[in-house]
Image: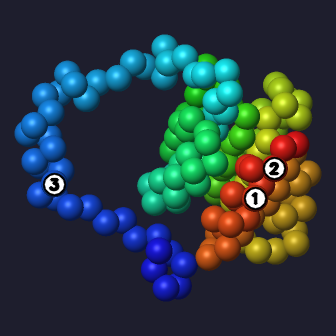
Amino acid sequence: MLPEGRVALVLNPGYLIDAAAHHPRQDLKRAPPEKRILPAHQRRGLVVDDSEIPRALGKHILQQAGFEVEVAANGQEALSLWKKLGAEVIVADVEMPVIDGLALTRAIRAAAGNEVRIVLVSANDTPEARATAIAAGADAYLIKGSSLKSQLTAIVNSRP
């Protein structure tokens, strides 16, 4: 984390090249998500954001809370994944291409009612934006920033 609260992606190119050279491609393959069986106690989460760094941060937060996590780059991809795999918690950005977080929330609420906890995340900190998200069916509306990790962790660790 950078001092201002942003996440910095740090890669070691030498390590990545070395790791790729010592692990043949077939060793890196894994079963498609629909083939993976989760233990009975395992919870599934879905993180949806069109930007890679917030997606990775959301995935990390949910994994730290004990979730098996899938990611999607837009609402349409997320809706397909959710229909195929299900999820107990969905963390989605509001502003995304194809299907935005509000439309995704409405679609999931129409299909599953309140069975899924939906957290919408945005940089828009206005009362109107918050009210729109809650009216769409979001359980929580969080503002992107330095306290996002602690707030999201508290939400996903609490039982509905």
The crowd level at tag 3 (other Cα within 10 Å; few <14, some 14-19, many 20+) is few
Indicate the position of residue 53 as horizontal and vertical percent values: 46, 60
Q: Which residue is mark 1?
A: 154
Name the outermost residue toward the top: 35
The picture quadrant where one finds residue 70 is top right
Label tally: 3
Of residue 78 and residue 40, the one placed in the foreground of this image is: 40
Question: For residue 15, which numbered disc appears in the image?
Answer: 3
Q: Which residue: 57% across, 35% down?
A: 68
Judge whether residue 101 can be spotted in this image.
yes
Task: Confirm or deny contact between disc 2 and disc 1 (CB under 8 A).
Answer: yes
Q: Are marks 1 and 3 in contact (CB under 8 Å)?
A: no
Please name the residue that numbered disc 2 is placed on. Answer: 158
Dot 3: element: helix
Whether residue 148 is situated above or below residue 25 in the rendered picture? below
Identify the secondary structure beneath mark 1.
Answer: helix
Q: Is residue 77 above or below residue 123?
A: above
